[in-house]
Structures are given as C-alpha cells and as structure tokens.
C-alpha cells in the first residue's frame, strides 16, 4: 500500500474517532425539580427540537464511528450520562450464560463478566467507567444487545458490573421505555438555547457544549396579574424574564386601562397600556404590551416578587456583558429585527425584541427595543433602556412618561 494512502486512512480514522458525540440530560432545581419538556434551539444553525424532560439529547456530528444498534425495547441504562454509577436493565429471553461487557471506542473490551441467567428482566449496577463514551454489550445464546454509555466520572477506580435484581418471566416482555435518546446534528462551537418547561415554570439556559453534561434549570415562579407565566433567564447575578411583559392587570388584580384613541393616550397622567397598532391578535404574543411610565410607577406592574429595573440595574447588566452587550441579549436573525441586526447572538437567552413605541402614533417596530426603567428624570420624563437594530451596544435616554414602551422584569 502506498504511503500516501496510509496517511489518508489514518487521517480519516482520526476524524471518525474525534467527531463530537455528546449526550445532554436535564434536571430541575428551585420552585420545582420536575422537567416536563425541553425545547432546544441551535442559535448557530437555526435547527430546533422539542424533547421530553427525561430524554437524552444526543448531539452528533456528520461523521463518527459506526455505533451498534440500540434496541430500546430490550435494553436500557439510566442515568445516561452517568456520574458515578448507572443501572443497566435488559430482558433475557431464555436460560443460558450471558456476557456483559464494556467496550471502548477502539473496540477493546475494558471489562466483562459472565453469568447464568433465567428468562426475565435483569438489572446490573455499572460503575467505575472512565470518562467519555463507551458501549455496553449484552450477549446471550440467542440474543445480542448493545447501547451507548457516557461517563462523566472524574474518580479513578476499578470498573464493576454487579447484579442488583431479577424479575422472572417466560415471555421475554419488552421493557417499558423510560428514556429515549433524541438525535440533533451539532457542529463544534454551535451555541444551543435550552428552554425547560415544568407546568407554569419555564427557564432558559444557553451553552456551547464541549462534552456530555447535565443542564440544570433553575425554576422560579413568575406569573402576572392576568395569570400569564413567563420564562426566566439568569445573567450574572440577575434573573430576568426572557419575554416582554403582556399583562392587562397590576399584580394586585387592578385593571390597567387599554387606551386605543391617540389623543386620549397623549393626555394620560395615569396608568395605561395598549398593543402595537391596537392589534392584540397580531402583536401581543410576540412583542407584549406597550405601557406608559405611570403604569410602571405603580410598583405593581411586574409579577409579585419581580420589579421594573432601575438605571443602576441596567448598568450592572451592561457592565457584566461587556463588549457587544446589546448583541448578547438581542434575538438573533431578522425574523423580528430589521437587517443587519448588528452583533446579535442572543448568547444570554434574554431574547430582546424590537417592540416599537407609541406616542402620537405607533412606529419603529423592528428597529428599536425601548424598555422602561424606574428612573424619573423630571416631572414629564423618565429613563429608558435602548437597543438598536444597527448597534451591538446597549444605550439609555429619557423620554416622555406618556410614551408607550416595552417592559422587562427583574427578580427581587
């Protein structure tokens, strides 16, 4: 064989073994520990997938070593990825000797046991597996199962496979599926946005995966006077809602007047709100409401336990984000922002949207995000946070209190 051919084969082999193959599991903390569903958005490629909270997200590249067939009806391992140990369960259809082995990516068997089993469902504890991906193989006289196992253990100890239980049967009934591995194409360096949902709770986490891991959602109650539930996102030491406010009531149940007439809107010196172009069906769900500063100044506009941010709190956010501060919080792409949407990566998950403004009329939808603060500049003007379609830095200014702007809430 020519030397050049050998080199090409070696390079291809290296590419196959080094291709990313990560598994991501999910957990919840805070006001609830359950995770019912997870929506995963690849902010880099635009791909999206929604999975059950107990499923495993399998991030795989376009190339990689061929993996054994997985029969989820007859073999399972959980949790996967494993920290220190996992439980392997499988169905043995008949009497006989069964070999259970751990095989690394090169095909080498690193640990194996052999045991006599009766027909039925059997469970074994697997522990001491080196970090990374390997395969668990179960081989009997008339069956051959295999599944992937990802270890995140950082402790060096001997591998073990120990029997923990057996349930006899004569039919070889399949296992009830508890966990599925859901594939998603992934290129090294892609940024993923995970939205975990558990009943009324929703939390966002962003990450650039470089290994298998568990994503933990920190769920916090955030429900407005109308009963709308909001997604939350942690940025530094602050916790924000990741949507524009869309309530029609204060958090004590008081109705906020919905003012459609332009002249009446300009005359307000009391709380008021509207939807962009007075069209709730088209704009409410995405952009939320537009509120005057008098609604903000009640101190009851945000959900209980949350508040409209001060100028200092906006500055803390900007300082924490540093360069490209606006780009890091703007929704990426041009579905809602006007091109070029400079610097937008949304790597924080804040998902700032350009909800426009209302003064004597409605304008600038898609161009600017005007977001109220609590700072009062004068009898007629108050502070506003500004994010532009053609800038990657956050800004601020003062505008008339009668203007209608978006609201984002910050956890107390």
Image (tube, rainbow, N blue to C red):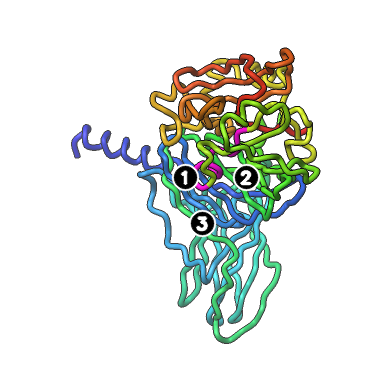
Which one is earlier in the sequence, the residue at label 3 or at label 2?
A: 3
- Mark 1 = which residue? 21
Q: Looking at the image, which residue is at 55% across and 81% down? A: 172
The reply to whether the magenta stretch includes residue 82 is: no
For marks 1 and 3 on the same chain, the one whose residue lies earlier in the sequence: 1
In the figure, 125 relative to 281: above or below? below
Residue found 54% across the figure and 45% down from its top: 280
Location of the C terminus by quadrant is top right
Q: Answer with mark 2 or mark 1, whichever residue precedes in sequence.
A: 1
Q: Position of residue 258 (x, y in %)?
A: 64, 40
State left or right for residue 14 relative to residue 59: left
Q: Nearer the viewer, residue 142 or 333?
A: 333
Residue 285 is covered by the magenta coloring? yes
Q: Secondary structure at mark 2?
A: strand
Q: Nearer the viewer, residue 352 or 285?
A: 285
Per the model, the C-alpha gap separating discs 1 and 3 is 12 Å
Are discs 2 and 1 less than 8 Å apart at CB?
no
- The boundaries of the magenta stretch are 281-290
Mark number, residue 199: none
Q: Main secondary structure of the magenta part?
A: helix
Question: Which residue of the protein is positioned furthest toward the left in this rendering?
Answer: 2
Residue 139 at x, y = what percent?
50, 69
- Vertical position of residue 69 compared to residue 293: above or below: below
Q: Can the viewer see residue 210 in this picture?
A: no
Q: Give how far apart the Cα atoms at labels 3 and 2 are.
A: 14 Å
Q: Nearer the viewer, mark 1 or mark 3?
A: 3
Q: Secondary structure at mark 3?
A: strand
Residue identifier under label 2: 214
Q: Where residue 300 sits in the image (x, y, percent)?
A: 78, 36
């Amino acid at each position: 064989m020519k030397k050049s051919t050998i080199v090409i084969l070696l390079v291809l082999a290296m590419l196959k073994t080094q291709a990313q193959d990560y598994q991501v599991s999910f957990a919840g903390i805070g006001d609830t520990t359950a995770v019912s569903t997870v929506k995963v958005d690849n902010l880099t490629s635009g791909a999206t997938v929604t999975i059950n909270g107990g499923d495993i997200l399998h991030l795989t590249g376009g190339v990689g070593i061929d993996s054994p067939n997985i029969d989820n009806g007859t073999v399972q391992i959980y949790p996967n990825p494993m920290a220190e140990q996992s439980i392997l369960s499988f169905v043995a259809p008949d009497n006989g000797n069964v070999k259970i082995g751990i095989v690394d990516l090169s095909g080498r068997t690193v640990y194996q046991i052999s045991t006599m089993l009766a027909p039925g469902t059997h469970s074994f504890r697997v522990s001491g597996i080196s970090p990374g991906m390997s395969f668990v193989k179960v081989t009997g006289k008339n069956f051959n199962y295999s599944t992937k196992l990802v270890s995140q253990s950082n402790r060096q100890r001997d591998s073990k496979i120990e029997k923990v239980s057996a349930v006899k049967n004569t039919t070889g009934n399949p296992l009830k599926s508890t966990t599925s591995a859901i594939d998603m194409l992934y290129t090294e360096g892609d940024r993923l946005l995970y939205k975990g949902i558990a009943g009324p709770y929703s939390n966002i986490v962003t990450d650039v995966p470089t290994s298998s891991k568990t994503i933990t959602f920190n769920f916090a109650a955030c429900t407005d006077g109308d009963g709308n539930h909001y997604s939350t996102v942690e940025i530094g030491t602050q916790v924000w809602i990741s949507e524009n406010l869309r309530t029609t009531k204060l958090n004590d149940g008081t109705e906020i007047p919905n003012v459609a007439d332009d002249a009446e809107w300009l005359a307000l010196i009391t709380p008021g709100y509207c939807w962009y172009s007075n069209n709730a069906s088209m704009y409410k769900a995405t952009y939320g409401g537009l509120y005057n500063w008098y609604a903000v100044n009640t101190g009851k506009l945000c959900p209980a336990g949350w508040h409209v941010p001060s100028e200092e709190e906006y500055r803390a956010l900007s300082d924490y984000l540093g360069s490209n501060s606006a780009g890091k919080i703007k929704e990426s792409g041009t579905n809602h922002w006007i091109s070029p949407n400079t610097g937008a990566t949304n790597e924080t998950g804040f998902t700032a949207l350009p909800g426009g403004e209302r003064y004597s009329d409605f304008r600038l939808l898609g161009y600017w995000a005007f977001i109220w603060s609590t700072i009062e500049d004068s009898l007629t003007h108050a502070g506003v946070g500004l994010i532009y379609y053609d800038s990657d830095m956050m800004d601020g200014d003062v505008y008339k209190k009668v203007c209608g702007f978006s609201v984002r809430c910050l956890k107390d």
